[in-house]
Structure formats: C-alpha cells, structure tokens
Image (tube, rainbow, N blue to C red):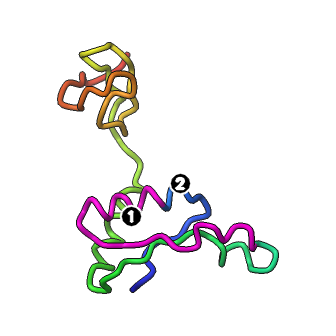
Amino acid sequence: MKLVYTHPNLAIVVQAASLLEQSQIKCEVRNEYAAGAIGELAPINAWPEVWVVREHDATRAIKIVEGMQQPVDAPDWRCRQCESNNPATFDICWHCGEEISHKETSAE
C-alpha cells in the first residue's frame, strides 16, 4: 500500500479515490474520521488520505489526481435538452441529467 493523496476536505479525497477506482486502480480512504483527534494529533496528521493497494499503481494514481486538480480551460455549456447552464466541469446536465454529447459550446 502506498499513500498517494491527502487533503483536509474529505469530499475532495473521496472524489480522488472515486476517480482512481474508475481508472481501475484499487485504493482506500483512510483517516476519514480522524478530524475528531485534532488537538491530540497535528491537524495535517488527521487529514483524510488515499492509499493505493498495489504500489506499482502509485505513479499513475498520482498523475490522475494531479490531472483532477488542474483548472478547466473551457467555457460553460448550455444543455440542448432543457436549456440549463452548466459549468464546464460537468459531464452531465445538473438539471435533467442529459449527457455531455448534447451540450452546446457556451452558456451565454
């Protein structure tokens, strides 16, 4: 097992773990309940963590997580199904669930 990512926000750590699982990298989240120990532990030692099960997956896992953290340089888009505006980071419409293949190029 190897530590590949840590962050103070559990939701972001879970998102990273989910992305790794979607990429066929087995991992687990640790320290998800450690925030209650802050005071007894240094805050950084209580941050939630993502550990990969197979150490040979660590380099690829780190690259995937780094890619997740890159800013998206794309315009927001408008759903052709329901006309709702969606952030560029969304692959499906937040309102109706229509997939990205039905998006327009901008949400002006």
Reading the chain from its start, which is encountered first: label 2 or label 1?
A: 2
Q: Residue at x 18, y 30 (%)?
A: 101
At numbered mark 1, what does the secondary structure look like: helix, strand or loop? helix
Q: Quadrant of residue 103?
A: top left
Cα distance between the residues tagged 2 and 1: 16 Å
The residue stretch that appears in magenta: 14-37
- Amino acid type for the residue under numbered disc 1: Glu
Category of crowding for the residue at label 1, using alpha-carbon neighbours closer than 10 angstroms: few (below 14), some (14–19), many (at least 20): few
Find the residue positioned furthest to the right.
39
As rendered, which of 34 and 91 lies closer to the eye?
34
Horizontal side, residue 100 vs residue 73: left or right: left
Residue at 74% from the left image edge and 78% from the top image edge: 42
Mark 2 or 1, which is nearer the eye? 2
12 on left or right of 83:
right
> Label 2 is placed on what type of residue?
Ala
Residue at the spot x=29%, y=37% of the render? 91
Q: Secondary structure at mark 2?
A: helix
Q: Which residue is situated farthest in the front direction here?
A: 33
| Magenta highlight on residue 86 | no
Q: Is residue 27 magenta?
A: yes
Using the image, determine if residue 66 lies above or below residue 82. Answer: below
Image coordinates of residue 81 in percent, x first then y, are 25, 15
Label 1 sits on residue: 66
Q: Residues within 10 Å of mark 2 (few under 14, many from 20)?
A: few
Quadrant for residue 24, please give it.
bottom left
Q: Is residue 61 left or right of residue 71?
A: left
- The residue that mark 2 highlights is 11
**Which quadrant would the C terminus be assigned to in this image?**
top left
Instruction: Using the image as rendered, state which of residue 71 and residue 22 is in the foreground.
Output: 22
**How many numbered marks, from 0 up?**
2
